[in-house]
Image (cartoon, rainbow, N blue to C red):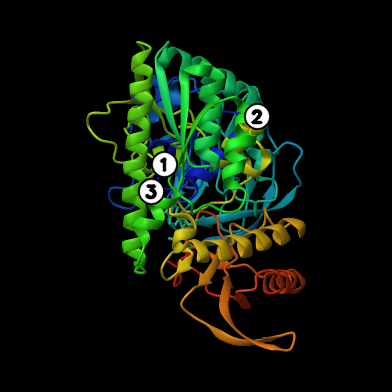
Amino acid sequence: MVDFGAQYAQLIARRVREANVYSEIVPHTWTPEQMLARDPAAIILSGGPSSVYATGAPFVDAALFDAGVPVLGICYGFQAMAQALGGKVAQTGVREYGGTEVEVCSAGALLAGTPATQTTWMSHGDSVHAAPEGFEVLATSSGSPVAAFEDRERRLFGVQWHPEVKHSAHGQTVLEHFLYDGAGLAADWTPDNVIADQVAAIRAQVGDARVVCGLSGGVDSSVAAALVQRAVGDQLTCVFVDHGLLREGEVEQVERDFVAATGVNLVVRDERKRFLNALEGHSDPETKRKIIGREFIRVFEDAARDVVADAGEHGEQVKFLVQGTLYPDVVESGGGEGAANIKSHHNVGGLPDDLKFELVEPLRTLFKDEVRAVGRELGVPEPIVARQPFPGPGLGIRIIGEVTAERLEILRRADAIAREELTRAGLDAEIWQCPVVLLADVRSVGVQGDGRTYGHPIVLRPVSSEDAMTADWTRMPYDVLSAISTRITNEVSEVNRVVLDVTSKPPGTIEWE
Ligand code: XMP
């Protein structure tokens, strides 16, 4: 996938993988030689913000089309391809944006079996007015005389619209036609093949050295650990720091269920007192975050040192550290091969110099949904695999005010109720996450039974999001909200009011601190 700066670049790569074909994103600044050196079985040119007429607009070197590798151009990629091969791209000033009807004039390989008129998602200013020589025009729209074309012999294809976007009615079919029929690829990028490949790669990298992994209880570190365990078994030691800021049941999930399912060697550090002591007297959000991050690094350092010392007694060396780095992190950090990318996530960040580890990153080629599929295949327990995002500082930043053992207990119970009801209502997949926040320094008057109460409010913050960069508050069914509110106020005596946060991001962040 050659990225021309498309907001859709990662989406295209994901859709290709949904067709069970492995894909990688490379920048358009690569030369054809660099791209071909990766030995691609097929190339997709993405859309991009430019006009081919803009000064400095990225262009496609025609040499790319002479290599015998099948190519699909999408939107800008389609126009750049048309131009490079001698077609005509016109600046008509007619923009097509959003849902756009196209008429199929000849289905070819690309549009085979799709309707004669179909809705596609367009976003472009220029349009292709004449296909290059040897190409057959497959479709037209009112603003694009040539809206799709192909040269089956040379295995070159293009569409003006965005097949990766769900609003393009037959988009996935078009992509699959290109991959399977146009490029002759097999649908063999499946979780079990990913596991087999990664197991082999980890074994080759690690040999018989020892490996350490910081487990957070989240999806990424758990699946990474399970993969490494599958590859090198007892050479791996996982360290889990119980900082006391986790939600109900999470420690047990890791200590018991995860170990039972994967057989990893687990060292649990009970550091609840240490974190509470460190947090005592602090209610400023940034100070709390810094304290939690700092303590985390220290504890993990100690734990890693212990593992190293322990291994040393047996004459072995701990040389490797497992990281749950995902593909979007790799792409966003400049991507591609060899780009060092260490998440500043505080469960592993900032290790001291005298602990020199090489990184093992078995998830570097995977998107989040693929990590989940791999985790399921490895038998990682469903509550861990399906976990919604949860901040590293945990409940510590969902208690507005000072963090104390009592307040943590109140929030843990309220949070467990909200999660139970959301799961019961089948909303887990629909909601990105639902922070439950305790306004610990606020009290309000209520009445319960015959008595006056003076309790704390709990805030529900259900949000819908694609990537947590922006979010909207989720319009949850009233009966689910009502069930959560009733149960929390009945079952958590310190809480007498439940309120709903109806702020999008921006302006509000997802978390309150
Ligand atoms: P905000 O509050 O910035 O959150 O809108 C965006 C997403 O990031 C999560 N979050 C964190 N995740 N360490 C993490 O691993 C953190 O310190 C942290 N703070 C926020 C948050 O839950 C949401 O998904």
SS class, disc 3: loop
Please say if the residues under marks 2 and 1 sit with CB atoms less than 8 Å apart. no
Q: Which amino acid, by three-letter code, is at mark 1?
A: Asp
Q: Which amino acid, by three-letter code, is at mark 3?
A: Val
Give coordinates of residue 361: x percent, y percent. 43, 29
Q: As rendered, which of 263 and 93 lies closer to the eye?
A: 263
Q: As rendered, which of 262 and 139 lies closer to the eye?
A: 262
Distance CA(mark 2)–CA(mark 1): 28 Å
Give coordinates of residue 184: x percent, y percent. 63, 22
Query: Which label number is shown at residue 52?
Result: 3
Give coordinates of residue 383: x percent, y percent. 65, 44
Q: Which amino acid, by three-letter code, is at mark 2?
A: Ala
Q: Eyeballing the image, is 496 above or below 6?
A: below
- Mark 1 vs ligand 1: CB below 8 Å: no
Distance CA(mark 2)–CA(mark 3): 54 Å
Mark nearer the viewer, 2 or 3: 2
SS class, disc 1: helix
Q: As rendered, which of 179 and 394 lies closer to the eye?
A: 394
Q: Is residue 423 visible?
A: yes
Give coordinates of residue 155: x percent, y percent. 56, 26
Counting residues from the N terminus, which is met first, the one under dot 2 or under dot 3? Answer: 3
Q: As rendered, which of 210 and 413 lies closer to the eye?
A: 413
Query: Which label number is shown at residue 261?
Result: 2
Residue occupying image coordinates x 46% and y 51%: 7
Residue that label 1 marks: 329
Mark nearer the viewer, 1 or 3: 1
Q: Is residue 338 found left or right of 67 in the rendered image?
A: left
